[in-house]
Image (cartoon, helix red, strand yellow):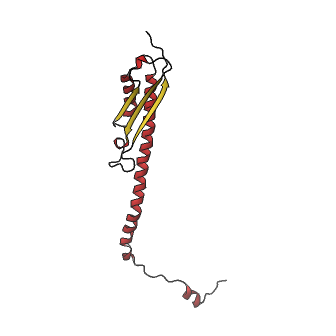
Amino acid sequence: MFAVSSQREFASAPRRTKTRTCNRVGAVSVEFSLVAIPMFLILFAAIELGRGMMTVQALEEAARSGCRIAVLKGSTTADIDSEIHQLLSAMGSFHFTTQTIPAALDTVPQWDPVTVRVSADFADMTWLPVPRFLAGMSYTASCVLPREAEIVK
């Protein structure tokens, strides 16, 4: 029933030796320092690029919304600027510039194009204390729509 094992089988079995853990204490710190640098670099790059993509979408939506206001009868550049400011302030406070072409909206005939441009620097929009990847870059979003209403004379 029971197999009898010989002394030879036990002799060939691997023996446990005392492992020396005191040699490995510094190795964990070195391994972490080698892995942590690229890991944090990738993490911060993902945060900054994600914020950049979010900002591009917000600037494009603000330009589109401002242009929708600009093509209406009786609209002024103050109306356009307040609409753009309202949309972009929800995203966070940063500096941006707006430009409406033509500047005098009351003289634009029906179906002529009206352009609204919104531009901002990425350095003003970052969540990180020191922007590395998008520093020095800016983005300009623009929208062109035809004037909808005729001028009342």
Question: In this orientation, does residue 109 appear?
Answer: yes
Measured from the top left, where is residue 15 in percent x and y?
50, 83
Horizontal side of residue 55 vs 95, given as left or right: right
- Image location (x, y in percent) of residue 73: 44, 17
- Residue 148: x %, y % from top left: 49, 19
Establish if 22 lies above or below 109: below
Nearer-the-camera pick, 47 or 97 = 97
Quadrant containing the N terminus is bottom right
Asked where in the image residue 96 lies, by quadrant, the reply is top left
Residue 90: image x %, image y %? 38, 34
Image: 116 above or below 2: above
Residue 42's quadrant in the figure?
bottom left
- How many numbered marks, from 0 up? 0
The furthest residue to the top: 153
In this view, the residue farthest toward the right is 1
130 left or right of 57? left
Quadrant where the C terminus sits is top left
Residue 91 visible in this rendered orientation of the protein: no
Q: Is residue 138 left or right of residue 111?
A: left
Residue 126: which quarter of the image? top left
Q: Residue at x 40, y 67 (%)?
A: 31
